[in-house]
Amino acid sequence: MSNQMSKATPLGVLDQRMLRKRNKMLRRQPTLAWYLFLLPTLLGIAVFMIYPLAESLRLSFTKGADERFVGLQNYVSVLESGTFWYSVYNTLYITVFQLLIAIPLGFIIACLINNLRRGSNFFKVLFYLPNVTSIVAAATVFLALLHPDGPLNYVVQLLGFEKLVWLSQPLSARWGAIILSVWHWLGFVIIINLANLQAISSDYYEAASIDGASGFKQWLYITLPNMVGSLTVLFVIGWIGGLQRFSDAYMLGGLQGSPARSLHTVVGFIFERGFGGYEYGLASAASYILFFFILAFTYVNTKVTKMKI
């Protein structure tokens, strides 16, 4: 009763207000601390990501050293350029075959490593080593492998075929880039698949063994359905990375993607026009067109594979 009377007095109301204000300040302190820790990251994103994106968008509507406003002319020029569409074809060609080879091959190798009782760590390191190597260094090594008298042609001749001058013909040059990209990316595919394989409960396999299911049926009806998630992620990541391909193709084919521009990718087109021809407006427009390509491909892939982001 006495407590209720004290709340009704002006002094009691004042105390409650001060208490609420103090609690509110205490609740704000952790939030302010989080923002303080995030401040360097937010500044980095603003300076190195948002500002370049905005500046590139502005440049895409300009032309020449005086940055004269030309509207959508740069976008029209890029979309009417035969060189640009040939670079799109090269990018898609290399990416499609990279995904078709690397993902199934990586999945099979991961299944084999997962069934090993000994030596699995050795094979994990062996296959993952190329992925941690710089693509520039890997491409330099591959230039030696693709030499007419190199090891790759030695294997080709052992199989009964004539040796190839890999980087002299458009088709063989593209396949040289495909082999390099598969070799470099395969370790990542294997590690992701192994992580998913080891997460599948052993109870499923024990129950299937009791029911008399063979090893192949266990792989087909237990392993494969449980791997859909990781295979989908690899597929989407592979598409995005493939459309941004530059370093490996540049190392093998140079600025113009020789021979006959067969290794000239979309990013190579942007690099050539921007830093080779000083056409920054055109290069910026091509960058935004590539951005919308990646956005459209990612949207289609997530819808087709029913992936949730």
Image (cartoon, rainbow, N blue to C red):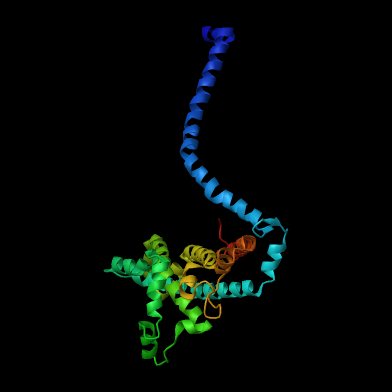
The correct choice, above or below, for 206 with respect to 162 in the image is above
Q: Position of residue 263 (x, y in %)?
A: 53, 75
Residue 48 vs 191, above or below: the answer is above
* 208, 187: nearer the viewer: 187
On the question of residue 190 being in view, the answer is: no
Q: Residue at x 55, y 64 (%)?
A: 275
Q: Nearer the viewer, residue 100 or 36?
A: 36
Image quadrant where one finds the N terminus: top right
Direction front: furthest residue: 66
Identity of the residue drawn at 30% across and 70% down: 116
Q: Position of residue 229 (x, y in %)?
A: 49, 62
Q: Position of residue 244 (x, y in %)?
A: 53, 65
Say left or right for 125 vs 260.
Answer: left
Count of numbered circles on the image: 0
Indicate left or right for 301 with 252 as reference.
Answer: right
Could you tell me if residue 269 is visible in this image? yes
Left or right, 217 with respect to 299, comes to left
Return the residue found at the far left.
118
Location of the C terminus by quadrant is bottom right
User: Residue at the spot x=56%, y=60% of the render?
Assistant: 307
Q: Residue at x 40, y 82 (%)?
A: 147
- Nearest the eye: 294 or 24: 294
